[in-house]
Amino acid sequence: MTSQNRPVLIYDSDCNFCSHWIARWRHVTGDRVDYLPSQEVAHQFPDIAPEKFEASVQLVQRDGTVYEGAEAVFRTLAFNPNHGWPLWMYRRIPAVALVTEFLYRFVARHRTGFGRLTGWLLGDHLELSTWYTTRKVFLSLLGVIYFFAFTSLWVQIEGLVGSRGIMPVNEFLNGVKEITGTERYWVLPTVFWFNASDEFLNLICLAGTGLSLCLVGRIFVVPALILLWFFYLSLMTASQEFMSFEWDALLLEAGFLAIFLAPSGGRHLAESPPSPLVLFLYRFLLFRLIFLSGMAKLASGDPTWRDGTALKFHFETQPLPTWGGWYAHQLPSWLQEFSVGGLFVTQLVVPFFIFAPRRLRHTACAVLAGFQLLIIITGNYAFFNFLTLALCLLLLDDAFWKKWLPERMVCTQPQEHLKRAPVNKSKQWAVGTLTATVIFVSVTQDLIPLVFKGHEVPSLSKTIHNWFRPLHIVNSYGLFAVMTTKRPEIVIEGSMDGETWKAYEFKWKPGELKRAPEFVAPHQPRLDWQMWFAALGGYRQNRWVMQFMTRLLEGAEPVLHLLKSNPFPNKPPGQIRAVVYEYKFTDFSDWRADGSWWRRELKGLYVPVIKLPESA
C-alpha cells in the first residue's frame, strides 16, 4: 500500500541483489518511503525511460523530482535521521559522488555475482542489525572486569603505594609538587592530590568495587561509568610502575568509550540504540589492539618472530606462566613454529574482518575469542584477555543473542523504535569529535609509522597525543614485540648473621622448584609481575627494588602481606641481598622423576648485601 505523501523507490524485483538490499532498507526507513517493483509500476511513470529501470533504482520524490543510482540510495537512507551521513558525504566531500556512482554502475553490471556474494556474507538476516543485548552484555562484563581490577588492587594497595609500602604515593606526589605548578593536576590526574592517606587509598578501591557492582546491576549506569573511569585513572597515576601495563590503559580507554555507549536512563539499557560511531570506535580499538601487536613483532626485527621460534621460548619465559604453559612448552617444535604462523594470521589478517559484513565479523569474533582463551590457558595476564573477550562480543548483534540466550535475557525493541530514535545533537557532536580525534591520532602515531618506517609523525598529531596521554583515552598497543629467550629470576634472601640465608617466597612467581605454576588471573599480583621486569635489567634501573628490600629490613607488614611466606616471623633480618637464578622448565622425564616443574642455575648477585643504617 502506497501513499501520495511518501517518496517511492522503484527497483527491479527480478534482481536478487536489489531485492535483498531493498528488504534491509525497509527496516531503516520504515513507513517514510514506499518500495515498489518496476515490473508493477513502471507504467505509472512514463517520464522515466524503461531502460533506466533496468540500469538502476529510481527515487521519485513527492514533488516529482527523480534521482537514480547511488544518489537515490543515499537520499532514501537519509529519510532516517541516523543514516543521513552518506548523503552528506556524497554532497559535501569532493570525489565521493564520482566514486560511489562508478561503484554503483560496476555492481549493477555484475549484479548476479554480487547477489550471491551478498547472500553468503549476510545470510538470511535481512533486518537492520540492533545492538541492545550486545550493549547489555558488554556493560555487564565491563562491570565484572572493573570489579576484579579494583578488588585485585585493593588487597595490595597499601603494600605497593601506602605510607609503609614500597613506593608511597604521598612521597611521590609531594616530590612532584615541589618541582611543578598547577599543570601537575593535568599531567598526573589523580584524586590523591587532595588526600593520599592509606584510608583514602582503601576508600577509593572500595568505591570502585561498589560502583562496578552498580554497573553490573544497571544502577546509575552513566554516573557509575564516569566515576569508575576517574577512580581507576587516579589509582593508575598514583601506583606508578605497578600500574604501567597495557591492560590498565586498555581498561581506561574501553571504560571511557562506555560512557558514550551507555544510555542515560539508568536501569533500562534498551531505551535508546547504541551510537553507531561508538560501536565503530570499539571495533577500531579491538583492531588496533590486535593488529598493532602483530605489526610490532614484525617491526621489531626480533629474530625469533622472524624465524618462527618465538613460542619455543614464550611459554617458559613469560612473566607468570600456568601449568598449561608448561604443557604447551613440551609441544613438538614443528607445532610451535606452525603456531607462530597462525598467530600472525590471527593478528595481521583476521582484524580486518572486524569491519566486514556480518558473517565475516562473527568469524573474526570466534577466531579472536579462541585466541584469547588459549592465552588464558597458558599464561596469567590479569584481566587483559577477559577484557579483550568482552570487546570481541561487541562484534555480535542482537540476532546472534536471540539464538543463544533465554528470551528473558534478550533486550528487544521494535524496529520502529530504532527508526524513530531521537538524535541527541550534543552527544552526537561529542562522539563525532572523539571519533575524529581517535582515528587521527591512532593512524598517524601508531599505524602509519609501523607500516611505513621512517614516516614523520605530524606535529599536530604529537600535540594532540601528548594532550590526551595523561587521560589514557587513546593508547598505543603492542605486547611481546621482542621475545625474551631466557628467564632470570630474582630471589630475595635475608640473614641474621651473614652466614645463613633464608629466601622470601613470593605468592605466584616461580620460586620453589616443585611448586606447579598456578592460575591467578584475573587477579594480578603486581609485585610478582614487577619482579619479572626487574630481572631483565639491573637494580639501578629499578629503584623500587631497593625500597622493597628496605621495607623487608624494616619488617613493614603491608609489604610482607604481598609475599607468600616470611622466613623471619619474629624479627626482621639484620641484612638482606638479592641473587639471580636462570630458571627453565623441566620436561616430562624430570617431572616424573622428582616432581619438579623447574630447574635453575645460580648466576650471581643482583643486589649486594644491604643493612639498615642503624644496623651498620
Image (tube, rainbow, N blue to C red):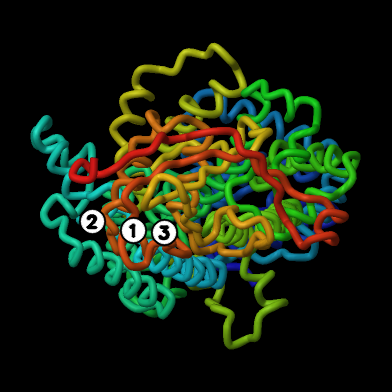
Q: Looking at the image, which residue is at 83% across and 44% down?
A: 114
In this rendered view, identify the residue nearer to me: 130 or 254. 254
Horizontal side of 240 relative to 133 (left or right) equals left
Q: Mark 3 points at which residue?
A: 258
Query: What is the distance, in whole Å, between disc 2 and disc 1 at their CAs?
Result: 8 Å
* Residue 222 x %, y %: 32, 66
Which mark identifies residue 559?
1
Q: Looking at the image, is mark 1 or mark 3 nearer the viewer?
A: 1
Q: Indicate the secondary structure of the residue bearing disc 2.
A: loop
Q: Mark 2 points at which residue?
A: 164
Pointer 1 with pointer 3, Cβ within 8 A: no
What residue occupies the far bottom of the structure in this picture? 408
Q: What residue type is labelled 3?
A: Ala
Horizontal side of 289 relative to 195 (left or right) equals right
Q: Is residue 70 above or below residue 9?
A: above
In terms of sequence position, does the residue under pointer 2 or pointer 3 come before the other? Answer: 2
Q: Which amino acid does label 2 sit on?
A: Arg
In this rendered view, identify the residue nearer to me: 155 or 452. 155
In this rendered view, identify the residue nearer to me: 462 or 299. 299
Q: Indicate the secondary structure of the residue bearing disc 1.
A: helix
Q: In this view, does 291 lie above or below 416?
A: above
